[in-house]
Image (cartoon, helix red, strand yellow):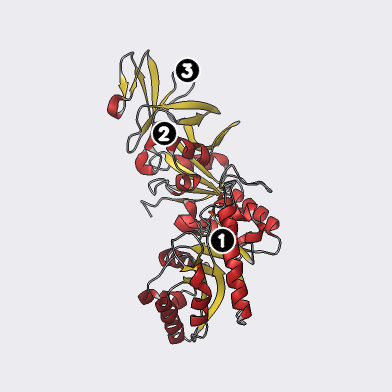
Amino acid sequence: MNITEQHEFINNIIRPAWIEIDLDAVAQNVRNIKQYLGGVQYLAVVKADGYGLGAVETAQVILENGADRLGVVMLDEAIQLRRAGITAPILNMGNIRADQAYYVPEYGLEQIVFRPDVAKALSHAAGAKSSIAQIHVKIDTGMSRYGVRYDKAAAFIESIINLPNLEIIGAMTHFPKSDAIDKSFALLQIERMLAIKKALVNKGITIPLWHTANSGATLDLPAAHFDMVRVGLMNYGYFPSSDVRRPFTLHPAMSVKARIININRIRRGDSVGYGRRFIAEKDETIAVLPMGYSDGYSRKLSQVGQVLIKGRRIPIVGGLCMDAFFIKITDHPDIQEGDIATLMGIDGDEEISPHDIARLAGSVSYEVISCFGKRLPRVHIRNGKIVKIKNYLLS
Ligand SMILES: Cc1ncc(COP(=O)(O)O)c(C=O)c1O
């Protein structure tokens, strides 16, 4: 497909608002992370539809470029990947009920375990399929979400280690605070894991994969690398915060775009949008972009956000609607209906990052990228060419 045909393709997106996913950027990010890790294993977290970039599409590229394993947080996500033909190891890092154990051997998954009933059910389900359930014991060292509490972890592992058809291949925990300057709590969590490891070794129990590190700890806490890291956000091109080290380059993979669909020339005293939050003090030119808060574009950007058009920063005015918002283009007479606005991403020398949006929306970059809605088609680009347009509503 040549460039003109590619543009035609994007033009044919019915509602002119979409997300571009640069799979070449994902590939390069994964190679950079892999090189930095040396011999440490690499689990790539592709939960929440690959943080909004498309789980199947990103997982394929991530695996091709050196990740060893995928991580999701629910059986449905794991099954989606298997149905797409992905055969790599997949760890379900989310909780399951005992009556759901059947799915684990059925789809050849690895599963976190922190409750005896689930361990027994997995042992039973694997036995029924003449297979072995590979599990990672989830240890709660300070997140208070999932896991067996750290002071009970060694005893729990001892209590399930001899269950038939069950193999404990991993022991893991998660950091609530690894990308801030203060690492004291993360260091305490590492100590807790090391104490458990030592207690088990003293009892002759060895577990091959100890893993704790998310993106922040992968960057800043080499002591947290153990045998494997679990990297999510960085695969997609974003550092987790501005406080972490940046030992390699990351390339942002997600751009959010929309075309101007209407232009209104308003007079002094006219108002814009719900709540009449913008009242013109002079004659103004207002353009309408077809995206709103129901698309995951925060209403908190009303009056304070910006978009990029032709490499220039253009202010958002008025309140965001559910499906549309307004920009003031009075000083840019060359901007016309049909022009493309970049809501997140790079245009010329300017960039709006998920961190920039998060700052204005009182959020975090994770929420910004993963909450763009399913009404926005994902346009996947590889080797500089569009390889797929996924329209969730029409597929
Ligand atoms: C258990 C677990 N491990 C690893 C990650 C990856 O974290 P990050 O995206 O900061 O790399 C997550 C994501 O929240 C997670 O829930």
Q: Which residue lies under the disc numbered 3?
A: 331
**Of the residues under marks 3 and 2, which one precedes in the sequence?**
2
Whether 368 is drawn above or below 267: the answer is below
Q: Nearer the viewer, residue 372 or 381?
A: 372
Q: Secondary structure at mark 2?
A: helix
Disc sitting over residue 229 in the figure: none
> Can residue 137 be seen by looking at this rendering?
yes
User: What amino acid is labelled 3 in the image?
Assistant: Asp
Residue 131 pos. (x, y %): 50, 83
Q: Which residue is mark 2?
A: 301
Kindly identify the residue that appears in the image at 52 percent across and 82 percent down. 161
**Three-letter code for the amino acid on which mark 1 is drawn:** Gln
Mark closer to the observer (3, 1)? 1
> Splitting the image into 4 quarters, where does residue 73 fall?
bottom left
Q: Secondary structure at mark 1?
A: helix
- Residue ID at (33%, 34%): 321
Q: Amino acid at mark 2?
A: Leu
Q: Looking at the image, which is closer to me, 357 or 29?
A: 357
Residue at 56 percent across and 72 percent down: it is 170
Residue under label 1: 189
